[in-house]
Image (cartoon, rainbow, N blue to C red):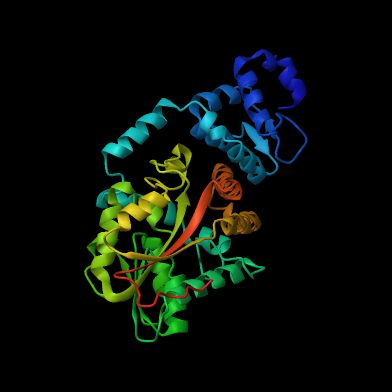
Amino acid sequence: MSSSCIEDLSIQDNQWYRIAHEMLGLAGIEINGSRPFDIQVKNPEFFKRVLQQGSLGLGESYMDGWWECERLDMFFQRVVSAGLEKKLPHHLKDTLRIAAARLTNLQSKKRAWIVGKEHYDLGNDLFTLMLDPYMQYSCGYWKDATTLEEAQEAKLRMICEKLQLQPGMRLLDIGCGWGGLSAYAAKNYGVSVVGVTISAEQQKLAQARCAGLDVQILLQDYRDLHQQFDRIVSVGMFEHVGPKNYRTYFDVVERNLAPHGLFLLHTIGSNKTDMNVDPWINKYIFPNGCLPSGRHIAEASEGHFVMEDWHNIGADYDRTLMAWFERFKQAWPQLAERYSERFERMFSYYLNACAGAFRARDLQLWQVVFSPKGVDGGIRVAR
């Protein structure tokens, strides 16, 4: 909708427009402005919908084509940096959902499989085209990298070096995804790997990727594991565990880790300790997910492990997400045969919104190394 159309509809006199205009102004964003991060509003009901429904209304109205923005990542960086999401009225449903999350276990064994089916089972074609050859659906390490493939290989190498993998060791990969880390560790470090996933699509591709290697890929809940491993790693899975299960998670890791072992946790982190449930992300991307805070991790791991190292590479997730978005755009002509235009808008919104949040340093990416009793003399951790 052009600015002349806004004038024709006398939107400026509308209370919803006025509130939205003032709020966006705090972030330096103009309605129907000419800069890449300004929004172009196509439907006059947009303002009321967003102010009444918050995050869900903003995301769904974009999916419905009610507004456009040339650079969504820049828009979200400004919105998050200005704290606008805290100023949005909390929709009653959001408040009820947070209350429900506190009272119920959204990541019970039965519910845990929901995210596997609804997100990771979207189809291997989408992720194969969007991700790097290692199929890493987690933050890359861009310290010396210039391409997505280099960044993801550097991440895999850093994880294996932090774990001090040696030939003959047994490695447990909790939430192994498409088997990229499991295959890399087995091939380059001579370890025997057991990977677990709750996605049938991931298991199929992971088994094919790891064929001929000393790797076993299991389709099961991590809570059912009762084995002994020299090393345990968990990349991009803790976000799906949920606060009610954090203690159980560390119980399971402790139960399966040898006394001399090391455990590496790689997770997105929140600056705040609360339920951290974004209603749009919960509905469309990661059902029942919840971002942990530093306090969550510290409290849940206390009594189980000694924390040997805590490394924040959150700024690198911005670059990783934008690399995924570029590959997603390039692949869309192939994907369009199977996915709708609304899906394309949804997935683009998701990648750019997350990139903006990491760029604004509202979200973090932590790699935490634990040992059962503390390593004699300490450890020198790879960077």
- Locate the N terminus and report the quarter of the image it occupies: top right
Q: Quadrant of residue 370?
A: bottom left
Q: State the image quarter where residue 233 is shown.
A: bottom left
Rendered image quadrant of residue 162: bottom left
For the question of whether residue 232 can be seen, the reply is no
Q: Nearer the viewer, residue 5 or 226?
A: 226
Foreground residue among 127 and 362: 362
Q: What residue appears at the point 64 percent right and 43 percent down from the top-left corner?
A: 72
Q: Is residue 342 above or below residue 212?
A: above
User: Can residue 154 be seen from the camera position used here?
Assistant: yes
Q: Is residue 150 left or right of residue 275?
A: right
- Quadrant location of the C terminus in the rendered image: bottom right
Q: Is residue 85 above or below residue 330?
A: above
User: Residue 318: percent from the left, percent from the top?
Assistant: 60, 54
| Image location of residue 145, percent across then percent down | 64, 69
Image: 108 above or below 60? below
Q: Residue at x 31, y 35 (%)?
A: 100
Q: Position of residue 121 (x, y in %)?
A: 42, 56
Residue at the image position 70 percent from the left and 42 percent from the top:
70
301 up-or-down from 282: above or below: below
Who is closer to the viewer here, 379 or 338? Answer: 379
